Image: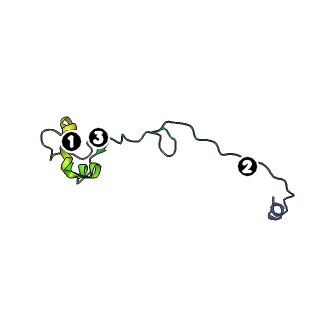
């Protein structure tokens, strides 16, 4: 089909084909529908430079609430709340 054939269309129209619907994979599916779930929104993975007060400030808006995060993760963190490690997955409790 050439350009002029397209321009001289004789009124023949075809109904538009609808796009296939994505498969329903649940509310936690990623944007592309691959079925991979997002990390739980109530968890946080420690990165370089983090402190419990920084994490509390980010999640709660108040760094002084770091105690709640520490108490919920005492088994992971240990006896010293200043010794969190990169890669630890902490539970962020609801207030």
Q: Which residue is mark 3?
A: 94
Residue sitting farthest toward the right = 10
**Residue 75 sits above or below residue 16 on the image:** above
Q: Is residue 39 left or right of residue 59?
A: right
Real-space Cα distance between discs 1 and 3? 9 Å
Q: Any mark on residue 68, and which? A: 1
Tags 2 and 3 touching, CB below 8 Å: no
Q: Is residue 79 left or right of residue 6?
A: left
> In this orientation, which residue lies closer to the viewer: 91 or 36?
91
Q: Position of residue 23 (x, y in %)?
A: 57, 37
User: Could you tell which of marks 2 and 3 lies nearer the N-terminus?
Assistant: 2
User: Could you tell which of marks 1 and 3 lies nearer the N-terminus?
Assistant: 1
Label 3 Cα crowd, 10 Å radius (few <14 / some 14-19 / many 20+) = few
Residue located 21% across and 52% down the image: 63
Q: Which residue is mark 2?
A: 16
Element at label 3: loop
Real-space Cα distance between discs 2 and 3? 49 Å
Image quadrant assignment for residue 19: top right
Tags 1 and 3 touching, CB below 8 Å: no
Residue sitting farthest toward the left = 79
């Amino acid at each position: 089909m050439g350009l002029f054939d397209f321009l001289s269309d004789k009124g023949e129209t075809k109904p538009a084909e609808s796009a296939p619907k994505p498969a329903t994979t649940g509310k936690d599916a990623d944007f592309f529908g691959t079925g991979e779930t997002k990390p739980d929104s109530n968890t946080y993975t420690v990165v370089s430079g983090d402190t419990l007060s920084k994490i509390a400030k980010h999640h709660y808006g108040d760094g002084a609430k770091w105690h709640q995060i520490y108490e919920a993760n005492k088994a992971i963190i240990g006896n010293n709340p200043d010794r969190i490690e990169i890669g630890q997955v902490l539970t962020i409790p609801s207030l």
